[in-house]
Image (cartoon, rainbow, N blue to C red):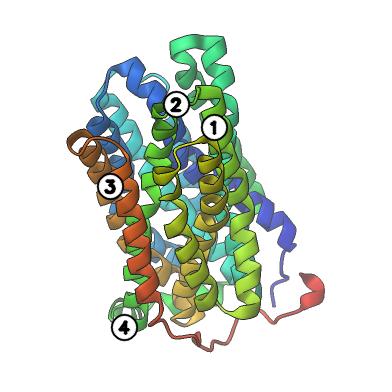
Amino acid sequence: MEKRPQIWIYAIVCTIATITAVGFGRMAYGILMPFMKESLSLSYQQMGMLGTSTAIGYLSLVLFAGILAAKWGSKKLVVLGNLLVAFGLLYLSWAQSFFACLAGMILLGIGAAFTYTPVVNIVVGWFPNRRGMMIGFVISGLGLGSLIASALIPFFTAWYSDNGWRYLWLVFSIIAFISAVVSYFILRDPPEVSRKTAAKSHSFLRDVYLNHKVILVAVIYGLIGFAYLIPQSFLFSFILDTGINSYSAGQLMSLGSIMSIFSGPLWGAVSDKIGRKMSLLVTLLLGAVSVIIPIGFPTYLGFVICQFLWGINVVGMLSLIQALSTEQVHQSYAPVALGYTTVYFAVGQLAGPGLGGWMIDHFGGIPPVLFLCSGLLILAFLLSLQVNKKAVQVQFVLQSVEGQD
């Protein structure tokens, strides 16, 4: 039997991979968007399309990434994904037009697809009884990426004026390349037996794609995907529109990012104790309430409350739904189930930023988009009431030896 790696080493390395691929490659865009918009003279609709283009790149390969992870192993895909993100970020730092940015954002989406699902497969495969906590740590990279971007953009704009966002993309590119190198030397694929069991493609249709429990989780995940990029893409601009200066706005976004760092591990650990369903219901309800608070109270305090509640719940709901997706099938099908449900998530993301930008341009501001976000989360809450509390009982390849965790 292959020796289980140290849990904290994998938690750190896999979280760094997520920071670069998803945090820098996707979430940081909402922070840099206003500066890119001004520098390149783009409309809100165009900026929304750029956010959507990343989802297109992600959607085009996320299902394929899950299948490849099940058949060939996840480590190679994590390294490849981080390298693609590094090149995409480097390209964005030199982009001079909307279409150049579009190509770079699509490449970021592809790199994120090849990184995230395989990373989750690695931690679930090695630490199945800690999947909630481990997925929580991995997905906290979203918040860490946003936090780093929020903290650095004021300094980069002060140092480099209109080109500050370009230099920040360049720095992120270098970090992504380093992450690829570290992943290559540290990570190992889970035991070979799991991948061989999952390689029976004829079983994917029956056990994953037509599994009604998987489909329900996938639809909920899709609604969350539709909703969660809306605040990330437009809330910073809404804060600026209320008259709050860019430095204070950056602090507010940093608050949400800091809270989201703890959100994934917190709710993952809680769900390992009280169950995924109850934890998911709480996060969805609080998330739906949080995004409409600044509409009624567009003040600094209102945004503080909004960002605190949103940050402490948003990454939690993502980690919980991902853990749920891997629990609806046998362990050997976990990466395929995650990849399949993530397709729904990515489809939701296609609609979110693009529709949000269009609504802002045609319905007089950002508040209607925040109402849309809240409504989508309420719908996800109602559907989550139907989720089966009992996860599939599986025989793990690795024995649970708590002393090694």
Spatial CA distance of label 2 from label 3 is: 20 Å
**Residue 222 appears in the figure:** yes
Q: Mark 1–mark 4 contact, CB under 8 Å?
A: no
As shown in the figure, which amino acid type bears the numbered disc 4? His
Quarter of the image where one finds residue 50: top left
Q: Residue 149 carries which label?
A: 1
Which structural element holds mark 1?
Answer: helix
Which structural element holds mark 2?
Answer: helix
59 vs 71, nearest the viewer:
59
Residue topped by disc 2? 90
Q: Mark 2–mark 3 contact, CB under 8 Å?
A: no
> Which-is-in-front pick, marks 4 and 2?
4
Mark 2 vs mark 3: which is more N-terminal? Answer: 3
Q: Residue at x 54, y 32 (%)?
A: 149
Residue 45 location, x and y as percent? Answer: 23, 33
Residue topped by disc 4? 212
As shown in the figure, which amino acid type bears the numbered disc 1? Ala
Residue topped by disc 3? 56
Mark 1 vs mark 3: which is more N-terminal? Answer: 3
Q: Quadrant of the N terminus?
A: bottom right
Q: Residue at x 29, y 53 (%)?
A: 372
Q: Mark 2–mark 1 contact, CB under 8 Å?
A: no
384 vs 88, nearest the viewer:
384
Q: In this view, does 193 lie above or below 227?
A: below
Mark 2 vs mark 1: which is more N-terminal? Answer: 2
